[in-house]
Amino acid sequence: MKKAFETRIEIPSGVVCKVLGNSIQCSKGGTQVDRNIEIPFVKIEVSGNEIIISTKKANKKDISKIKAQVAHLKNNFLGLNERFVYELEVCNVHFPMTVKVDGARLIISNFLGEKVARNANILPGV
């Protein structure tokens, strides 16, 4: 059975949020995070220090999709407050491979016993 559903997310202090179509743009300082929410018949608005996500007709699947997006938005707020750093760990099983960084390239030698080295580009900002 379809029913009306509305949820509110409190915006932390110092975070500025804007709604651009189906996406929410949140920024704090120089950091900016975008979240695209494409759920049919869902209305998104920013009112004061809250994000309101509502719909007039929602079934169980729509409500679960909205709640998942709410969890993603809360994780975006955490990401704006503290930086997350990914660390790459290289493990080998049998062959002793070598990994080197040469400027903006990652060179992997002796991968699974291969004679030719593999190259991977390192993206800017990484």
Image: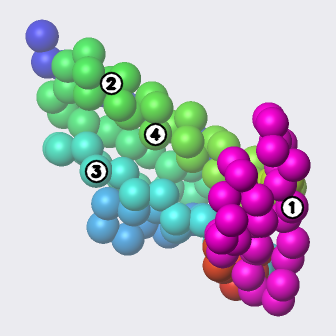
Q: In the image, residue 117 lies at what x, y percent? A: 69, 71
Image disc number at residue 98:
1
Separation of residues labelled 4 and 3 (CA atoms): 10 Å
Query: Can you identify the residue that label 4 sits on?
Result: 69
Q: In the image, residue 111 lies at what x, y percent? A: 71, 55
Q: Nearer the viewer, residue 5 or 75?
A: 75
Separation of residues labelled 1 and 4 (CA atoms): 41 Å
Looking at the image, which residue sits at the far bottom? 103
Q: Is residue 111 magenta?
A: yes
Above/below status of 123 relative to 35:
below
Q: Is residue 120 visible?
A: yes
Tally of numbered discs: 4
- Give the secondary structure at mark 3: loop
Q: Is residue 15 visible?
A: no
- Give the secondary structure at mark 2: helix
Q: Are marks 4 and 3 in contact (CB under 8 Å)?
A: no
Residue type marked 1:
Thr
